[in-house]
Image (tube, rainbow, N blue to C red):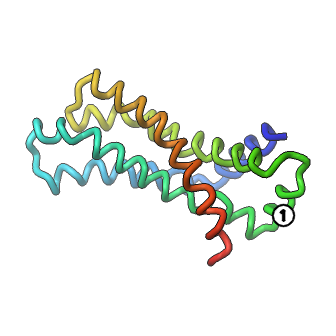
């Protein structure tokens, strides 16, 4: 049943292409605009690049987290998900993993290009990609209860 919820969430996300492209464009814009604010010194950019990439990726993930439960609440399917014979945390797990597959995974796949743009070395990029691989799903799991509590505020 969790697999069905996961696949359903992926289908819904791919139908709304702007919800996928928005965080990716935000990520790329933050990365490309940051050297304009700091300055074009290659040594400085290479030194602070991991922090820039981490913060930009986490902010981009937060942009898309807002719709984790909103669409289900608006169309009434949230109540149906709560009535499934699967524990509610398992449903939330499937939704968060689908969110990560749609937003976190593309951010990780863009990270080598972004690291190259900021002048990072290969060793530093590998470590940064590993921390992104751990950090983006962790953010989703930490933010899901807050998103669930605030879904009905609008």
Q: Residues within 10 Å of mark 1 (few under 14, many from 20)?
A: few
Could you tell me which residue is drawn at 54 percent across and 56 percent down?
A: 64
Residue 144 percent across, percent down from the top left: 61, 55
28 lies above or below 121: below
Which residue of the protein is positioned furthest toward the bottom in this rendering?
A: 154
Q: Considering the image in quadrants, where does the C terminus appear? A: bottom right
Residue 98 percent across, percent down from the top left: 65, 43
Could you tell me which residue is drawn at 36 percent across and 44 percent down?
A: 54
Instruction: Look at mark 1 in the image and give the residue it sits on.
Output: 79
Q: For this rendering, which residue is in front, 15 or 93?
A: 93
Q: Locate residue 21 relative to residue 81 in the image: left or right.
A: left
Q: Is mark 1 on a helix, strand or loop?
A: helix
Which residue of the protein is positioned furthest toward the top in this rendering?
A: 123
Could you tell me which residue is drawn at 78 percent across and 45 percent down?
A: 5
Residue 102 percent across, percent down from the top left: 58, 44
63 lies above or below 56: below
Q: Locate residue 55 relative to residue 153 in the image: left or right.
A: left
Give the quadrant of residue 10. top right
> In this figure, what is the number of numbered marks?
1
Could you tell me which residue is drawn at 22 percent across and 38 percent down?
A: 118
Residue 99 percent across, percent down from the top left: 61, 47
Q: Considering the image in quadrants, where does the N terminus appear? A: top right
Q: Locate residue 34 relative to residue 19 in the image: left or right.
A: left
């Amino acid at each position: 049943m969790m697999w069905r919820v996961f696949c359903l969430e992926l289908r819904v996300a791919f139908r709304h292409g702007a919800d996928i492209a928005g965080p990716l464009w935000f990520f790329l814009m933050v990365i490309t605009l940051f050297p304009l604010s700091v300055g074009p010194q290659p040594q400085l950019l290479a030194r602070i690049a991991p922090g820039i990439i981490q913060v930009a990726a986490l902010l981009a993930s937060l942009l898309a987290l807002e719709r984790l439960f909103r669409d289900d609440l608006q169309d009434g399917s949230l109540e149906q998900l709560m009535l499934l014979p699967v524990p509610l945390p398992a449903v939330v797990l499937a939704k968060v993993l689908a969110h990560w597959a749609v937003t976190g995974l593309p951010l990780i796949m863009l990270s080598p290009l972004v690291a190259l743009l900021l002048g990072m070395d290969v060793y530093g990029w590998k470590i940064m990609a590993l921390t992104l691989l751990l950090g983006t799903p962790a953010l989703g799991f930490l933010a899901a209860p807050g998103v669930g509590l605030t879904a009905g505020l609008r």
